[in-house]
Image (spheres, rainbow, N blue to C red):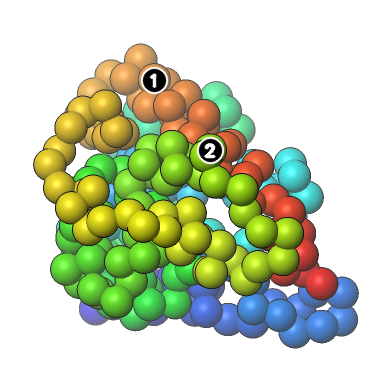
Amino acid sequence: MQSVQQESASVSRLADAEVTTGLVTLLPRVLFICTANRCRSPLAEQLMRRALQRLQVDALVASAGFLPGGFATPSVGVRVAATEGLDLARHLSVRVGKRLVEVSDLILTMTREHAREIVALAPEAWPRVYPLKQFTELVGSVELPRRADFRDAAVMVGEGRRVNSILGNPGYDAVEDPMGRPAPVWESVMADLRTHIDQVATSFAPLLWRSRR
């Protein structure tokens, strides 16, 4: 029951309209996915929020995983995150459901396996689902249009991409899982995530800024 309530809260956070400059707008919605939503995806969520704040743009950001929800981030992860000014002390994991995927404009996963599981859960979401490192590789070679809806732009990044691009589990485009690992591994994972998330935020900042108008 708790897991269902937490997923519903995440859906609401991503789906609800926000009031900006007196107008009701539906902000772009970004969802990060990992296995348990206790390590990588909550770190990614908070790093993305910080990057957007630094760029002075708005989006709704959430994270989820595939295991039952309601579990905290390991204490070592909370401590390492705190050194970067990130607060994971109150984080409780959320189990992803189809509705959460449906309301998300861009779904970024930590591995190809996660991407396949999301596509199996919601096949129609395929054009908006990317392993994080695949997405940053693609967005670096695409010139986004000056005027585009955020969801449309997310799809454009992978235009022509084949479904088999998420087959296999190569290590080079996966974000390492720090669960059960010591602090230096967490620090390495956080640095890896920061690099890619900063690239995503910077690439989409003009579209995110326009979404506020």
Nearest the eye: 108 or 160: 160
- Asked which secondary structure carries label 2, the reply is loop
Nearer the N terminus, badge 1 or badge 2?
A: 2
Q: Mark 1 or 2, which is nearer the eye? A: 2
In the figure, 69 relative to 11: above or below? Answer: above
Determine if residue 102 is in view: yes
For this orientation, the residue located farthest to the left is: 168
In the figure, 152 relative to 90: above or below? Answer: below
For this orientation, the residue located farthest to the top is: 184
Q: Residue at the location (33% across, 71% down)? A: 125
Nearest the eye: 45 or 112: 112
- Residue at image mark 2: 140
Q: Residue at the location (73% across, 59% down)? A: 146
**Disc 2 residue type?**
Gly
Q: Quadrant of residue 9?
A: bottom left
Determine if residue 87 is in view: no
x then y, percent, for residue 122: 25, 74
Determine the CA span between mark 1 and mark 2.
23 Å
In the figure, 41 relative to 2: above or below? Answer: above
**Disc 1 residue type?**
Ser
Dot 1 surroundings within 10 Å: few (below 14), some, or many (20 or more)? some
- Asked which secondary structure carries label 1, the reply is helix
- Residue at image mark 1: 188
Query: Which quarter shows the C terminus?
Result: bottom right
x then y, percent, for residue 59: 63, 62
In the figure, 74 relative to 96: above or below? Answer: above
